[in-house]
Structures are given as structure tokens and as C-alpha cells.
Image (cartoon, rainbow, N blue to C red):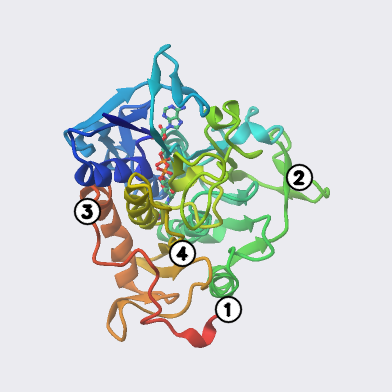
Amino acid sequence: MKKLVILGSGAGGTMMANKLATNLEEKDWQITVIDKTLDHHYQPGYLFIPFGMYLPKDVVRPRKNYLSRHIRFIHDEIQSVDAEQNKVHLASGSKIDYDFLIIASGCTIHPEENEGMTGEGWHQNIFDFYTLEGATKLAKFLRGWKGGKMVINIAEMPIKCPVAPLEFSFLADWYFSDKGIREDVHIEYVTPLSSAFTKKVAAAELGHFLEQKNIHVTTEFNLGEVDSEGNKISSFDEQNIDYDLLITIPTNMGAEFIGESGLGDELNFVPTDGKTLRSKEHDNIFVVGDASDIPASKAASVAHFASETLTKNFLRVIEGLDPEPSFDGHANCYIESGFGKGLLIDFNYEVEPLPGEFPLPGIGPFSLLKESKANHWGKMMYRWIYFNMLLRGVDLPIPAKMMMAGKNALHHVA
Ligand SMILES: Cc1cc2nc3c(=O)[nH]c(=O)nc-3n(C[C@H](O)[C@H](O)[C@H](O)COP(=O)(O)OP(=O)(O)OC[C@H]3O[C@@H](n4cnc5c(N)ncnc54)[C@H](O)[C@@H]3O)c2cc1C
């Protein structure tokens, strides 16, 4: 019997396990999934917790409910991978053999990478919203906050869901308006990028939103350290920004065991072929989701589209064929803009987010790069789609490859 081991049972690992369980013969293949926690978190929902739109219970589900019956689940911490011996070493001391390995261990925040971040201000007036703990503590803080200067800062790129800090800023503008204290809150968005977002056309559009909402933007700020006694952040080139409340998106890094095993780059992301999703170094290792270094957005939607390509490629490789270089970096992200509205962007490695309609040209119902109520409802529906379709490995009626139909290509910037 052949052994497939999947490291991590988050968005990408769960989708891959379920898709392959329906494609591989149970008598010929043992599929094992390893994760250190028993609960699956719907991370896109963390965004809504600080503003009281979701509670923690809305984003947490038992992992086992989402893995199909003949998948073996091991609850343990992965310590290292011996890619020469095809073995995974676990914290309990067990060693798990594999013929093929799929790395789906995602990435997490590392506030300790910036001096002073986890000092006395941590979870007092410095919060993240990229963890359930951070988002929940921030919700409590915001309920009692009377106003002041809120700084939203991205420490360094890449981060998962690069639009989430913008969405946080837009929702903060709405939340404080709704509470009747918007005039008492100065919001500043501080980014290491040269504009509001990674892609030019979308950056211009999102930049207008920030301006309209009176959110001050500081670009090219590369965070050095945090002075949590003096309430200021400093960049490597010695710019200083004061804050009363710091919302940080700390350095994102791949899992520690990736580094320990010599499988990663300096941020523990696995060098991966962006089109085949195979490890650049080991032919029997594949990577899905945030764990890879591919130049696509780190997003659940990307993990989903990639899982369709990877399923096909995995089935080819076990038949002795080469994987096809067919993944196009497709990402599809709803962007909450506050006041019950949102935007949608749909793009890939080659094509920037463009205006238009999605998925049906001329009909929508979603508008690309334009604010609408339908887009907000699309974002709210995403949680149901995530738990009931994506995680279970059900294909959506949207192709994995990005469609040009419905997009206004006049704006195309390659
Ligand atoms: C605030 C926020 C908002 C977001 N919004 C969106 C959005 O609107 N749309 C979107 O598409 N995406 C969004 N994302 C991104 C999305 O959640 C991630 O891209 C997605 O979860 C990546 O899936 P993954 O499988 O690669 O990693 P994960 O889902 O993070 O799963 C990794 C798994 O590996 C396990 N693991 C790691 N190390 C070990 C170890 N040593 N031993 C055992 N197990 C281990 C972890 O426990 C975890 O279960 C958002 C993320 C955040 C934080």
C-alpha cells in the first residue's frame, strides 16, 4: 500500500486530503493527515471579531468533521521531515513513513521578530487580529476605547491575505462612525509597500477609498522596533510614528519544522514551482497554500484553486507522468469596505485585478474593483462555502484558471 502524508489540516491540507480521498483507491492508498490542534479555524472570520460582527464560536469547528471517513488523522506536532529517508518525525516520538508528502502547514505571525513588540504594550494597546486570541482581545479593548490615534502597521511582506489590513482600516472607519466617535479617532495606515496594495490598478482604487474615508497613509515604512513605553514605532531609516493603539500585522513565517528540516528559505517558506506546485528540491514533495514561496497571494481562495491543479498533478505523477505547469496563481478576494459594502478582486500571476463583473459577464452579480452590497454578501457567504464546499473538496462552478470573460481588459497591466 502506498502512503501519502499531508502535513497540516488547515484550508489547503483539508481540501487536498478530501479531494485525493475521492480519487485514490482506498485499498491501494493510505492517506494520513497530521495536525497539532483539534480545531479548524476559519481565519478569514478573524477580521470580523474585533468589530463584534463574529464571535469566536463562529470561526471554530472540530477538524475531524471535515476529513472524509477513510483519512487517518494524527493529532501531534510535526518536529521535522527527513526528506532523504521519507520520514516525518513527531513530537510524541513517532516516525511516519511516506511515499509522497504534501506540505500544507501554512504560516503564522511572529511579533517577536521586531524588538519591543511583545513588551509591556502587547495585548494592552498593541494587538494583532491574525490570531483568534489577538482578535478576541482587541474586540474587548475596542468596546471600551474612547478614541485617539490608531495605527495599522504591516511589519513586512509577504503576509497572508494582503487585503485584510485594508479591510480592517475600512471596517474601523465604519465601526467608529457607527459608535459616533469617528471624529475622535485618527486612523493611519502604515505599510512597507510604495502604495496601498501589491498590485498597481487595485492600489490606485483602494488608495481612493482610504482618502475618502480620511485614513492617512504612510508608505515605504519598514518596521524596525516598537517603543511600547513611548508608544511609537520606528523604521529602519529612523522615521517615527506615534500611536495610542497599534494594530500590527507582524512578520509572517512558515512553520518552524520547515526551517529545522532544511526545506525552507529564510522565512521558512518552501521553494516551490509556482506552476506545478511541486517542491523545487524533492520530486515526491508537493506544497499547497501559505507554506510555499510561490508569488501568488497567501489566501484560502488561492489554496482552493491550487488544490484543483495539484490533485490533477498528483494523479499524473503517481502514474509516472510529469506534472503539468498549469497553475496560474488565480486569487479571488472579497474586500470589505464598511457600511455593508465590499469590493471583489480576481487576478493571477499575469493579470492584475481589473474592473468588470464576476462570474457572469454583464450580469455579475458581483462587481470587480467596484463597491457594491452584493460583494459584501459574497464575503459573508464565503464562510458557508468554505465549511460546506471548499474544505470538503467539492468543486465550485468557477474554473481554477482565471477567466478574462467579464473583465475590462483596457485596464490590463501585465
Ligand atoms: C485575518 C485574516 C483574514 C483572511 N481573509 C481571507 C479572505 O478573505 N480570503 C481568503 O481567501 N483568505 C483569507 N485569509 C487567508 C487564509 O486564511 C489562509 O491563506 C489559509 O488558511 C491558508 O491555508 P493553509 O492550509 O496554507 O494554512 P492554514 O489554514 O493556516 O493551516 C495550516 C495548518 O498546519 C498546522 N501546522 C502548522 N505547523 C504544524 C506543526 N508543526 N505540527 C502540526 N501541525 C502544524 C496548523 O495547526 C494548521 O492547522 C485570511 C487570513 C487571516 C489571518
Q: Nearer the viewer, mark 1 or mark 4?
A: 4
Q: Secondary structure at mark 3?
A: loop
Q: Amino acid at mark 2?
A: Ser
**Residue position for label 2:** 234
**Residue position for label 4:** 328
Q: Amino acid at mark 1?
A: Val
Q: Is residue 338 above or below residue 384?
A: below
Q: Secondary structure at mark 4?
A: loop
Identify the residue at the far top of this view: 93
State which image quarter holds ligand 1: top left
Q: Residues within 10 Å of mark 3 (few under 14, many from 20)?
A: some
State the separation of the CA atoms marked 3 and 4.
Answer: 20 Å
The x and y percentages for residue 108 are 51, 37
**Could you tell which of marks 2 and 1 lies nearer the N-terminus?**
2
The x and y percentages for residue 258 are 54, 32
Q: Is residue 46 left or right of residue 113?
A: left
Report if the CB atoms under discs 3 and 4 are less than 8 Å apart: no
